Image (tube, grey):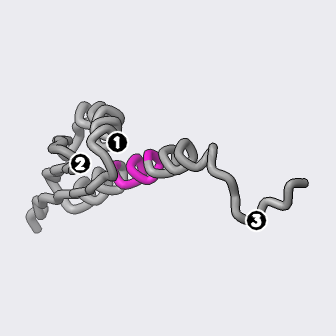
Amino acid sequence: MKCIKGKCRIELKFDSEADANAAHAALKQEEEFKKRSDSRVSVSGKSLSVDIDGEDVVALRATANSYLRALQAIESVGSSVVCSGCKKDDDNNE
């Protein structure tokens, strides 16, 4: 049986262009890891796109998962930075 080639596109909208550009800079290095897939990261305004071409379904899924994990980490770090100075509503001034 022949391998099935595939393509995937991940598109995300950020709150600001600065956030989209920061995510782009963080993800850009992932493009260099080419084994059985090829990927491109681009940004336009507040939108970030990741285009992936995989030689087979396993490679496509692995590359997509890698980007999604990195994006989850970026989101977590961004939330921590934004919320680190937030005052909680349930503070009891202890």
Between 24 and 89, the one lying in front of the other is: 89
Residue ID for mark 3: 90
Say whether disc 1 or disc 3 marks the residue closer to the N-terminus: 1
Disc 1 marks a residue whose amino acid type is Asp
Residue ID for mark 1: 19
Residue ID for mark 2: 46
Q: Are marks 2 and 1 in contact (CB under 8 Å)?
A: yes
Say whether disc 2 or disc 1 marks the residue closer to the N-terminus: 1
Picture residue at 28% right of the left edge, 59% below the top = 61
Task: Tell me the crowding category of disc 3: few under 14, some 14 to 19, or many 20 or more residues within 10 angstroms, Cα based.
Answer: few
Picture residue at 52% right of the left edge, 50% below the top = 79
Q: Quadrant of the C terminus?
A: bottom right
Q: Is residue 19 left or right of residue 56?
A: right
Image location (x, y in percent) of residue 68: 36, 54
Disc 3 marks a residue whose amino acid type is Asp
Label 2, label 3: how many angstroms apart (C-alpha)?
Answer: 33 Å
Q: Residue furthest right?
A: 94
Disc 2 marks a residue whose amino acid type is Lys
Q: Quadrant of the N terminus?
A: bottom left
